[in-house]
Image (spheres, rainbow, N blue to C red):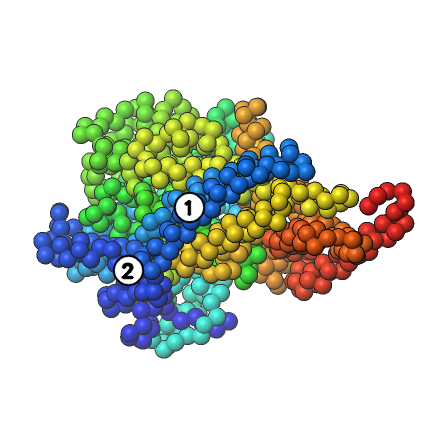
Amino acid sequence: MTSPAPAAGAVSEGDGGLADPLLATGNGTTRKTGAECEYWVPADEAERRATNECGGEDGRPLLFRTYKLKGAILHPYRALIFMRLVAVLLFFVWRIRHNRSNVMWFWMMSVVGDVWFGFSWLLNQLPKFNPIKSIPDLAALKRHYDLSDGTSKLSRIDVFVTTADPIDEPILYTINSILSILAADYPVDRLACYVSDDSGALILYEALVEVSKIANLWVPFCRKHCIEPRAPESYFELKAPPQTGRAPEEFVNDYKRVQMEYDEFKVRLDNLSDSIRKRSDVYNCMGTSEGDAKATWMANGTQWPGTWIDPTENHRKGHHAGIAKVVLNHPSREHHHGSQEPSFGVTDVRLPMLVYVSCEKNPSYDHNKKAGALNALLRVSALLSNAQFIINFDCDHYINNSQALRAAVCFMLDQREGDNTAFVQFPQRFDNVDPTDRYGNHNRVFFDGTMLALNGLQGPSYLGTGCMFRRIALYGIDSPHYKQDNIVVEANKFGNSTPFLNSVSQAIKQERFITPPQLDGTFITEMETVVTASYDKETDWGKGVGYIYNIATEDIVTGFRIHGQGWRSMYCTMDHDAFCGTAPINLTERLHQIVRWSGGSLEMFFSHNNPLIGGQRLQLLQRVSYLNMTVYPVTSLFILLYALCPVMWLIPDEIYIQRPFTRYVVYLLIIIVMIHMIGWLEIKWAGVTWLDYWRNEQFFMIGSTSAYPTAVLHMAKKLLTKKGIHFRVTSKQTTADSSDKFADLYEMRWAPMVIPTVVVLVANVGAIGVAMGKTVVYIGVWTVAKKMHAALGLLFNVWIMVLLYPFALAIMGRWAKRPIILVVLLPVVFVVVGMIYVALHVLLANVIPF
């Protein structure tokens, strides 16, 4: 493998480098992206001039730039939205006045469906009426917060990483996430990483111990050569050859050494399971375990308090003690020597604090899944570091831009909206998606369009990963505009840990936490206390404090609760993506993920967090946005109904849903074309491509005939039985075929939810074939009007087929590597079905009137 080049520090002068996000370049100047120059214009020039003249309200700098859409694109965009709204209303009036149909009950259902389509479109469109883009100014942050002596005034950050299962979520993903965090470009004494292991398995803890060793080499290497990205697995996959830079020979030597050590590190990771089992067998043979139980033993000769390899009561998955272990202490408490080979000279070799946490599991208590794990990390981190800001990651996400944490802090410390900003959400990006993004994993229409547009309101919703929070906002404290002067920290709200209650008081007063605590036995016991299964009982945790419980998607409802308390949020995009993760590129896993997300949204609608009644301080359009996020799965019921309409081709007589049919279809086409005209303007200002837009349309159709109806069914079941959506960890484990990076894309794992999609696909294929057969049989007797009606109906069938094209490829499995096969196969199937229809008509014409 050729050595990739260092990204910033070792490039030639004048090149900003990959590490430079948006407005910050390598020499501290600013620049604009092409999209900004073409569609966006500065919206804060007056504020900046006033700040430069008088220093602002409190002397703090402006740390982000605000852009608004140019009138040349904004005004047509708004005009089209208004025109389509009028067109939809006129369409409804026309349908009601011309209520003629061959099947009136179907006409009534279609009218209800059209009303719902119009309503859901309006819910989705109104919050995007005033898009605003906010860009972090890292150069300004550096000037005002980084001191000349190498120290910093930046606030502390606690980073949370959550993992549920070391099999479905491979340890190597988690380790790369942690290494990227430890190597982030942020003051080492103001950064701490907390890892939550829901399985309670020893293998992850020992993997973290191995991380603490390789990090002594990897982190200084990243700092010395300004490496991007700082997740080794992703970095060593780069194919770019080395460039000269400031010290090319030194870089190449360091690179080879670090790569060799990392390869050896991965071998040790692979051997951990066998090593733990062999060690445990030795200790168990010595008879040192309690009774006849086969314990799992740590390297220091003590029994592991979590899950054992051979599960027993109190040591099995779902029933084990709480664990909190400091793997790397605070740099002021622990001296890190780093590696002596290669030499890193004056490079800082210190490492941030690293902590392993596993919540206690007990069958008598609900551990509340990811939300419970995050709340436990919130309490443990309060005792150890009590950082003002918190950012959480799924275990398969890593820091792709080393300055991402600084970018989020820009919004939190800005003099305008900083104090009122509760969280900063980043878009989710994935680096394992196939080049054509067959199943819309990137979802850029949502991340780069919908979420970006919410910046013009109270801000984007919380999306589960890659989100930086203000700690006191998670504690349920109101925004500064509504905050009480004297807040009493009570045990019945936060729990009965006195040290934790003291930390909450310090956080509310924004007192700086300077000296890290001594890790004596008493303190370790206190950490284990706050991760017990019963700690949340009879408190406000999961209701008004922390991440919200009793819902499949804790993210959206947690963000809703925070917005409802008067806080705002910000959306941060960077030229070089801030974070990257691993997406489930297998269709079935992707659909299971969608079921959980959409099911959780419906659960929110049928709870006290319903956007219609909850969120006391929500802005009106922000409320509309949350309403759209909670009811959108219902749209699938009407889409599924329409998608099954082609079965009417099988009926001998022509059936018309609305008369006059030609005018009905023309009206539909006008409304649909207007949607795509609005979409065209959206992808312009959002910076997405037509392929992204098209994949979004295709996957929405696939989801609307499979995952979304399943979520609605789950919700109906919950309303009847009180049993919620079953939490299923989305498997990121790929197929064993390592020769093909996207091998999992071609594996079709059948599930009941895809049956309706198969039915829709078969119905449309059959309808097109029957339509061809009818054309042969009736071409001589059909009137011009009937021929036009048939052509318009066939257009609908073809449109459905095109939208379901990715699903058809999924059914083909590995044959889908050559999509041309499907292009050839479908016409053949159409012709065969048509010929069968003609043959049956000829043979049975005197028996059954076709």
Relative to 201, is 794 on the left or the right? right
Indicate the amino acid at tag 2.
Answer: Val
* Left or right, 88 with reference to 536: right
Front residue of 390/726: it is 726
The kind of secondary structure element at disc 2 is strand
Which quarter of the picture shows residue 140?
bottom left
Judge by depth and name the residue closer to the eye, 728 or 801: 801
Q: How many marks?
A: 2
Classify residue 33 by image quadrant: bottom left
The residue that disc 1 covers is 125
Secondary structure beneath label 1: helix
Residue 390 sits above or below residue 73 on the image? above
Disc 2 crowd, CA 10 A, few/some/many (<14, 14-19, 20+): some
Q: Amino acid at mark 1?
A: Gln
Is residue 397 left or right of 774 when viewed as pictured? left
Residue situated in front as seen by the camera: 840 or 703: 840
Image spot of residue 410 (x, y percent): 26, 52
Q: Nearer the viewer, mark 1 or mark 2?
A: 1
Residue 270 showing in the rendered view: no
Residue with the mark numbered 2: 41
Write the residue at 58% across / 39% down. 98
Are there few (<14), some (14-19), or many (20+) residues within 10 Å of tag 1? some
Determine the residue positioned at 51% across, 43% down. 91
